[in-house]
Amino acid sequence: MLQTPSETALDLRKRAEEKARKSESLDQESVSPEAAKQLLHELRVHQIELEMQNEELRITEHNLETERARYFDLYNLAPAGYLTINQQGLIVEANLTIATLLGVARGVLLKRPLSHFIFSADQDGYYLHRRHLVETGEPQVCELRMVRADGSLFWAHLQALSALETDGAVGCRIVISDVTKQKLVEIEVRTAKEQWEKTFDAMTDIVTVQDKNMYIVQANKAAHQFFQAEPGALQGKHCYELFTGTSQPCAGCPLVETLHDFENHTTVIKHENRGKTFQLSSAAMAAENGELQYFIHVARDITQQKKMEEELFQSHKMEAIGTLAGGIAHDFNNILSAIIGFSELAMHDLPEDSRARKDIDQVISSSRRAAELVKQILLFSRKGALQLHPFRPHLIVKEALKMLRSTLPTTISMDEHIDIECGSILADPTSIHQIVVNLCTNAYHAMENEKGALTVTLSRKEIGKEDIVEHDVSPGPFIELSIQDTGRGMDAKTMARIFEPYFTTNEVGKGSGLGLAVVHGIVKTLHGFIEVESEPGKGSTFHVYIPALAKSAEVSETTEIKDMPGGTERILVVDDEEIIVTLNKAVLEMLGYKVTATTSSAEALAKIRTHADEFDLVITDQTMPDLSGVELAKAILQIKPDMPIILCSGYSSVVTEKEALAYGIKKYAMKPMNITTLAQIVRDVLDENGRWLDGGKLLE
């Protein structure tokens, strides 16, 4: 056993006393010279040994002090704080590092509870930490916030282990490290991760992260919602089995391309089973070591966008049709004006019972139907507006069916049940014509192999409140138009969408999906409603209800030439169509007027400039080379402000009736006009203008 320095000194003391006693006894005895010499030698040896031991003791004490100083230097200057806490939780020993961390002198720490330096919100965590240490006896680790003397906080990492005190009580030793920087980095990383996850989940696109085998390793919230899956339920699955239910990637899948060349790819795929179109994009994700381990797959639902693109495309088509229709309407109405006008002139000179008169009457009637057809084209292309007036619809329905009979295959039978006494409605004849044509065309498309039966019924029906619960109309008498086919029929899902613009169940080339939408819009405008009956394989029946008038409108099947008003005023007629100028000149001269006619708007303006007082009225066409009708009217009114002007138009997208009247034009007339209408308009304008003086005062 190793002796301490104090034990060694005590032993030497005993041995020295023993030698001294022997020496005294020897002095008392007779000591031989040899013995004395031997004794002296031993004393010297002991003295030298004692000196050597004393030197060794001094070296040991020096080394001990050096090691003790080194220990305290290491303890005090260690990079971590060291504390010893007794059973009561009081600090009994602390190094300089922990004192520096807490911003106090080391002496201030002693006999103070460590909990005094723990942040209030983390006190429970600290006590739980100590409790586990006492109960288990095993080392414990925790992280909490500590408070410096100046009130600032820092994150501390505590490592504690049990230790026996000198009195045998159980205390603990704690190592405390400042981990504020690491903690802030952790918080920053965690915050960045949370922000990324929030962004990932906030994306409305279906986003998945997939591995090299196309297994989903992560999916955003939109993906779980779209596939109606619980969080995490999509992991380990393939996207193609979720989208299509198949075991192979979709044809044209961009992720397959990215797996091959690690480039970004985008494509559009329509999933028929889901009735949706997706824009798919894929990209490779590089790991920190540069290895391509994961891949991003994004599916964006562009169904509505595609629908809007189709609607825009259809809108552009309709705009082009409208432009074409406007041009056709202008030229065709000029032709019809000549046909109707010259026919009426010829008819005017024929006897009432003349066969030729009856034939010409049919020409006039057909020409008016042609004019209505032009209106229908303009209405279809959205270039015209509904002009409502009372009429009996059975004639229009019969005319439409007659036209359809010539266009439908003979393999489709047509059965008509038209009640000619059903009454009258307030509508535009052209719109009723369009309803019949569109519904019959829809029925024709529904009959496969161009075989089947088409039944059209027109009747009067009284509608009560109980019949219109689902419709925003008033009860009362209605005209019911029913169109029944023996086609393929529809299910409830299809029936719910048939009136949507551009929705169609037909193949490409068989309709644009506008027909039923147009019908629905017209019927709503007329304050009516539509009901549909249909079952798959049993055909369809469309019931159109339009409010009936209490009193039927008078119908004239023939053209009557009335006594037309005339006059002796001087009229300037301007139209770039020679035949219209000739017609109007002949009609007006027949009525007694003095007519100057020209096909040049520039020439007409020159006549006004030089001879303005020689004319009482100007009748001008709108669409002409050089000056348009409006431009000519403006120039004339600058020269002679009280000049009455009638503006005629077969069709114009430049000026409306309201705008023309605002310019000072007295009357806006649409071609074609019969000669009776022309005569009445001319007389009305001249009479109205004659009642006014230049000063704008009404003549009494």
Image (spheres, grey):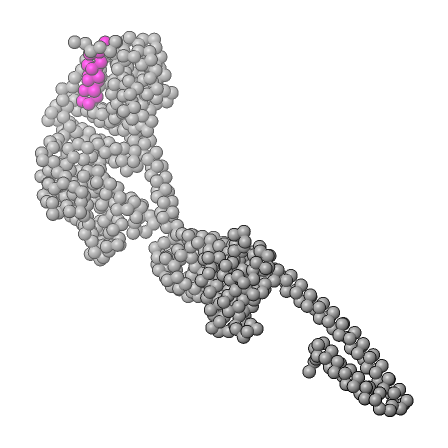
Query: Between 477 and 181, which is closer to the camera in this rendering?
Result: 181
Q: Position of residue 314 (x, y in %)?
A: 35, 42
What residue is shown at x 77% (from left), y 83% (from top)? 17
What residue is shown at x 59% (from left), y 63% (from top)? 94
Q: Is residue 412 above or below residue 642?
A: below
Q: In which quarter of the image is the C terminus?
A: top left
For residue 92, side relative to residue 662 (left or right): right
Q: In this view, does 155 lie above or below 650?
A: below
For residue 38, side relative to residue 673 (left or right): right
- Residue furthest to the front: 28
Q: Main secondary structure of the magenta part?
A: helix
Visible residue check, residue 190: no
Query: Between 597 and 538, which is closer to the camera in this rendering?
Result: 538
In which image quadrant can residue 207 be found? Answer: bottom left
Which stretch is magenta? 676-693
Q: Where is residue 469 in the image (x, y as percent from the top left)?
A: 15, 47
Q: Where is residue 187 in the image (x, y as percent from the top left)?
A: 50, 56
Asked if residue 334 is among those painted magenta in the image, a careful observer would answer no
